[in-house]
Image: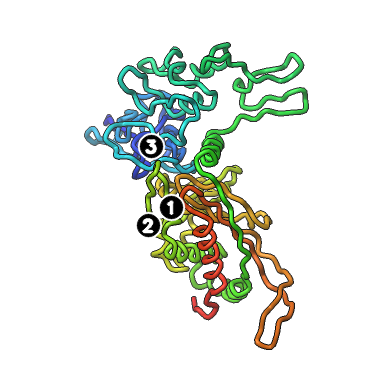
Amino acid sequence: MAKLELVMPKMGESIIEATILNWVKQVGDTVEEDETILEIATDKVDSEIPSPVAGTISKILFQVDDVVPVGEVIAIIETDQDVKTTTINTEAKGASAEAESVSDPEPASTPKTIVSAPTASPQAIPAAKTEGRRFYSPLVRNMAKQNGITLDVLDTIPGSGANGRVTKHDMQLFLDSPHTSNGKSKIMVQAPTTSSQTSISSSPTKSLNGENEIIEMDRMRRLISDHMVMSKQTSPHVTSFVEVDMSTIVSWRNRIKVQFQEKYGEKITYTPIFIQAVVKALQDFPMVNVSVDGYKIIKKNRINIGMATAMNSGNLIVPVIKNADQLSLLGLTKQVNDLAFRARDNKLKADEVQDGTFTLTNVGTFGNVMGTPIINQPQAAIMSVGIIQKKPAVIETDKGDFVGIKHLMFISLSYDHRVVDGMLGGSFLKRVSDYLEAFDATQTI
């Protein structure tokens, strides 16, 4: 019977390790080809790792919560195939999208954990083992961050994992017991009355007094929460608004949408038209397509547009259209439809939710007139589009003005006032409006 080595797959260009969330199969279990063996997580995605062969799990080399470098052997599968010992580098499948990474990718010189957002605690929790420090998984570091536990306190928690590592269970025991955090007494939050009071961290959902309910955030919602708070703490937000006449675009889309779908098999929405206008405006105002590193402004040469997408779970994900300036309206339409569909279906890949340079969000989808979105760090701006509404408006002609019906829409831009001033932000937004209103309704598909 041949033995095959299953290794940790590469999940994306900047992903160099992953955390084991759950072993679906245990030692001695049989697996079919393409059957899920384990679930892993990075700061980008949660994924299922399938078996590339039919066989039996003979050895598991890492445990739940262990952080494993890409390419490391994680399990041994015995199979009846008459082959020599083989290393299997399987691709993860069924990826469930996570919130975008806050930090830029770094060279993969040594294994390390990519942090999703800066910690708010006085001492940063290390991403990898350093001199005199233990290794902490992303899950443990997130739990420490959320509960205000400093590195010095974390170092005192007994670890029951491999090589003395602190596991989720160790953290839970620590949080459920009286202790001191950041030099202050840490008190677990409890229900105000009745004997059924329990700490928030003891269960995902607890009913209090038959009225209120405490719901533990899932992993993705925690990442989003940290990311949004960090953004507001990092960037002084300013928001500008412009009202756009969408009449020409609405008329053109209504006229060609059936023909477009018959010809290309794609539904054309307003989103690729918005993105096309944004791309042109970014080319005119490249200093909006930037990020900030301390007192340095990083001007992005590529235009990668993120589009905020609501998932079926209720969470938010931002798939990225890479090099959007190189795509035609048809190309943008295909990218938008594909990414949006797979985002809602939990099938995005890690590299499809990173490296965005500007983000677009459509609050009009939910019937909202306008929005003041939070900047998707480390970007410097995010644009929101509202619902398109028919409104009475003044129409100017050579023979005089009269009141008619127009399709109007508000667009807004939230921008980082450290590097984007009102003149730049306002001028950029007005330029987007100009491109939308100057849309060529004579173009063919």
* The one of 66 and 418 positioned closer to us in this rendering: 418
Among numbered discs 2 and 1, the one appearing first in the sequence:
2
Q: Quadrant of residue 256?
A: bottom right
SS at badge 3: loop
Q: Is residue 170 left or right of residue 85?
A: right
| Residue designated by label 3 | 51
SS at badge 1: loop
| Residue designated by label 1 | 357
Q: Are marks 2 and 1 in contact (CB under 8 Å)?
A: yes
Q: Report how far apart the C-alphas of labels 1 and 3 lie in the structure.
A: 36 Å
* The one of 81 and 376 positioned closer to us in this rendering: 376
Measured as percent of width and height from the top left, residue 269 is found at: 56, 64
What residue is shown at x 41% (from left), y 37% (from top)?
49
| Front tag of 2 and 3 | 2
Amino acid at dot 1: Thr
Q: Is residue 253 above or below residue 378?
A: below
Q: Is residue 219 above or below residue 133?
A: below
Q: Report how far apart the C-alphas of labels 2 and 1 lie in the structure.
A: 8 Å
SS at badge 2: loop
Measured as percent of width and height from the top left, residue 359 is found at: 50, 53
Among numbered discs 2 and 3, the one appearing first in the sequence:
3
| Residue designated by label 2 | 302
Outermost residue to the bottom: 399
Q: Which mark is residue 282?
A: none
What residue is shown at x 68% (from left), y 19% (from top)?
190
